[in-house]
């Protein structure tokens, strides 16, 4: 019998037709949209005079461009206000469900889609956002697309896509205390580089991956794009099923049982062949932090920035350019380095478990006076849950406050900008130059590492902080 | 709706030897607030190109009058990061018709092709030769022949073949648009939906 990878099973069952010597016409089960990458696609649809094929498979939210304070008031910034209004008008016109500002289901597109059960195992999922790979945590083929492709899906519920190659990354063994899924993915990217998985769709496997919660799995799949992968996925299991049970849009009753039977078939067959296989040992992963201007430039929090002679000659000028931007020196240690800002949030680490982890670390302690901290829940549902668990009170007592949901300082399209030259320990996904505001300097890390930095005002190994 | 046809492009080029040029550098997020596709070229490489007070940074290649042309030549892993098609729009709107690098990020490559901007992937060695030739003589000409899938450094005659998906090649040569193609397959798509209970 032919053996197939999980990715093959899902992809192949969604191919409407293959163009000879060309891409596949791939059917899309779920299409998430937001205010930034959809307006030109709606305008294209309008110009062509064609209807939106499947509004029932489309879900919209406003997240990238919205303030995280005073959301009940009109958006101050004119262009942002217009973009959010354009989304609202388009959704009304084409009959797309929109969880806009102040809707109880509003939040970051990759947080709400999963927590509402709109994302399910075995689906093909796209969104005009590269972090669509997040949804792969449920055993779905999920990937980011450009605006022309958003228009394709609007018009036909399909995209034209060449089938990527397949890679499996296996993490064996058990994680050390203080090491989270964010550290796993930062470690992988630091090992294979920011372009190391370009052209591949990655399946994550192994004991360490299986041991993770859904929130933690989402963090890993989310950052697949940061090593260039088309997407990342994890085979669904009991953790997935119990997470999905009773979610807002999850199948109910008989349909749930039928779905479950199908979902249980979703795994790579024994002997399925991947184009590339990588294996890492969980016990060798430490809490990680990035020091440069791409997510592949990561080190253990208690490690050192590579010395110049450890960098390939062809890559030295880029390495030095990045260090110059960060104002770091080759070979230096980052532990104890003073920082200015801490950002907890984003589609990478803005879920309830991330807020729990942060709160557990700062409980009974005080925020360093030198640090400005922004704690931004990924959605209103996350915010509600945090309040229900009393996490807001723990945070408040330690000198932190919860802001309102949105993408916020991850890409700084709204007012939440890190000032030029300042250092931010951020739980988001990109440390590119100016990503968090012109001239800002980003150090990517886990919620635990971010919490430790918020308390001490310095880069701190969370593992030591716990003990 | 057609895209502009691409066949043979002969031009001087603009060298940007930086590696991992991400889409946040190509077009920073704060310029993504538009609701149309126009005008992004103005903010192409904004923070590398301009100071805070909007004066041009003289050291950046787009501000150097020596370098002109329709071809951008960049270091490896060009276009990594966000899926923003605005990056391709900005490069095209600025006036580039092709980007040459030794490695492209996937989403950027797809976005470029969907907008008639040709990504040309060449070997690291040939890229190095082009950078040296342009450094020596800024008016060095490159010729990209899509039909033959070749890129030639005209000063030396040295050329390389490059890969492009045959479907995408025919789209660019003829100015076809993917959405028109997909709309022409509508019946087949609807049959698929029916058959699979979608």
Image (tube, coloured by chain):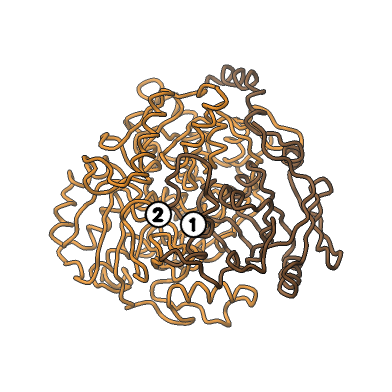
Chain colours: A orange, B brown
Question: Residue under circle 1?
Answer: B24
Query: Of A342 and A41, which appears nearest the observer?
Result: A41
Vertical position of residue B85 compared to residue B125: above or below: above
Q: Which mark is residue B81?
A: none
Circles 1 and 2, Cβ within 8 Å, touching? The answer is: yes
Q: Quadrant of residue A260?
A: top left
Q: Quadrant of residue A62?
A: top left
Residue at 44% x, 71% y is A291
| Chain bearing mark 2 | A
For the residues tagged 1 and 2, is the chain the same?
A: no
Q: Secondary structure at mark 2?
A: loop
Pick the quarter of the image with the N terminus of chain B. Answer: top right
- Spatial CA distance of label 1 from label 2 is 9 Å
Q: Position of residue B86 (x, y in %)?
A: 53, 47
Task: Say whether residue A45 is left or right of residue B139.
Answer: left
Vertical position of residue B109 compared to residue A112: above or below: below
Question: Residue under circle 2?
Answer: A411
Q: Position of residue A317 (x, y in %)?
A: 58, 75
Residue at 36% x, 31% y is A88
Q: Position of residue A279 (x, y in %)?
A: 56, 60
Residue at 54% x, 31% y is A44
Q: Secondary structure at mark 1?
A: helix
| Chain bearing mark 1 | B
Residue at 49% x, 31% y is A42
């Amino acid at each position: 019998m032919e053996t197939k990878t999980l990715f093959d099973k899902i992809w192949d069952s969604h191919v409407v037709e293959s163009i000879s010597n060309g891409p596949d016409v791939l059917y899309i089960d779920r299409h998430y949209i937001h205010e930034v990458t959809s307006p030109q696609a709606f305008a294209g649809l309008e110009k062509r005079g064609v209807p939106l094929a499947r509004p029932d498979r489309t879900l919209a939210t406003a997240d990238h461009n919205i303030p995280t304070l005073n959301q009940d008031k009109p958006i101050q910034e004119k262009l942002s206000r217009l973009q959010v209004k354009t989304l609202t008008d388009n959704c009304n016109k084409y009959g797309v469900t929109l969880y806009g500002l102040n809707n109880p289901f509003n939040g970051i597109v990759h947080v709400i889609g999963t927590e509402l059960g709109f994302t399910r195992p075995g689906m093909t999922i796209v969104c005009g956002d590269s972090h669509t790979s997040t949804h792969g945590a449920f055993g779905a083929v999920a990937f980011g697309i450009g605006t022309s492709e958003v228009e394709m899906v609007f018009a036909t519920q399909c995209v034209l896509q060449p089938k990527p190659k397949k890679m499996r990354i296996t993490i064996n063994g058990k994680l050390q205390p203080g090491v989270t899924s964010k550290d796993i993915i930062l470690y992988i990217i630091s090992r294979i580089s920011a372009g190391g998985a370009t052209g591949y769709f990655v399946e994550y496997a192994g004991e360490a991956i299986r041991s993770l919660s859904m929130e933690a799995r989402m963090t890993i799949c989310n950052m697949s794009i940061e090593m260039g992968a088309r997407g990342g996925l994890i085979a669904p299991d009991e953790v997935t099923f119990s997470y999905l049970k009773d979610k807002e849009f999850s199948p109910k009753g008989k349909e749930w049982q039928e779905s479950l039977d199908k979902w249980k078939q979703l795994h790579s067959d024994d002997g399925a062949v991947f184009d590339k296989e990588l294996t890492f040992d969980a016990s060798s992963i430490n809490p990680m932090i990035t020091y440069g201007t791409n997510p592949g430039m990561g080190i253990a929090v208690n490690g050192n920035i590579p010395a110049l002679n450890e960098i390939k000659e062809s890559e030295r000028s880029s390495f030095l350019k990045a260090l110059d931007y960060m104002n770091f020196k080759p070979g230096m240690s980052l532990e104890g380095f003073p920082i200015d800002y801490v950002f907890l949030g984003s589609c990478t680490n803005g879920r309830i478990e991330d807020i729990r982890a942060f709160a557990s670390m700062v409980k009974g302690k005080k925020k360093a006076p030198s640090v400005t901290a922004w704690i931004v829940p990924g959605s209103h549902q996350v915010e509600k849950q945090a309040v229900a668990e009393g996490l807001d009170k723990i945070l408040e007592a330690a000198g932190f406050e919860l802001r309102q949901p949105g993408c916020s300082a991850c890409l700084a399209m709204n007012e939440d900008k890190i000032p030029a030259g300042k250092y931010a320990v951020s739980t988001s996904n990109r440390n590119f130059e100016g990503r968090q505001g012109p001239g800002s300097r980003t150090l990517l890390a886990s919620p635990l590492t971010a919490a430790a930095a918020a308390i001490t005002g310095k880069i701190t190994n969370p593992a030591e902080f716990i003990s | 709706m057609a895209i502009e046809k691409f066949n043979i492009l002969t031009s001087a080029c603009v060298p940007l030897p930086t590696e991992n040029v991400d889409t946040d550098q190509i077009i920073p997020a704060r310029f993504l607030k538009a609701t149309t596709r126009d005008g992004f070229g103005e903010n192409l490489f904004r923070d590398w190109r301009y100071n805070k007070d909007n004066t041009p940074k003289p050291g950046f290649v787009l501000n150097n009058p020596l370098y002109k042309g329709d071809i951008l030549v960049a270091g490896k892993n060009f276009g990594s990061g966000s899926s923003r098609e605005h990056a391709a729009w900005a490069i095209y709107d600025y006036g580039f018709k092709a980007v040459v690098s030794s490695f492209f990020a996937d989403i950027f490559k797809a976005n470029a092709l969907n907008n008639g901007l040709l990504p040309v992937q060449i070997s690291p060695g040939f890229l190095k030769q082009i950078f040296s030739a342009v450094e020596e003589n800024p008016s060095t000409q490159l010729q990209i022949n899509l039909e033959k899938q070749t890129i030639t450094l005209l000063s030396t005659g040295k050329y390389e073949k490059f890969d492009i998906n045959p479907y995408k090649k025919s789209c660019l040569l003829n100015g076809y648009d993917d959405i028109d193609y997909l709309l022409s397959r509508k019946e087949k798509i609807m049959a698929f939906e029916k058959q699979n209970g979608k």
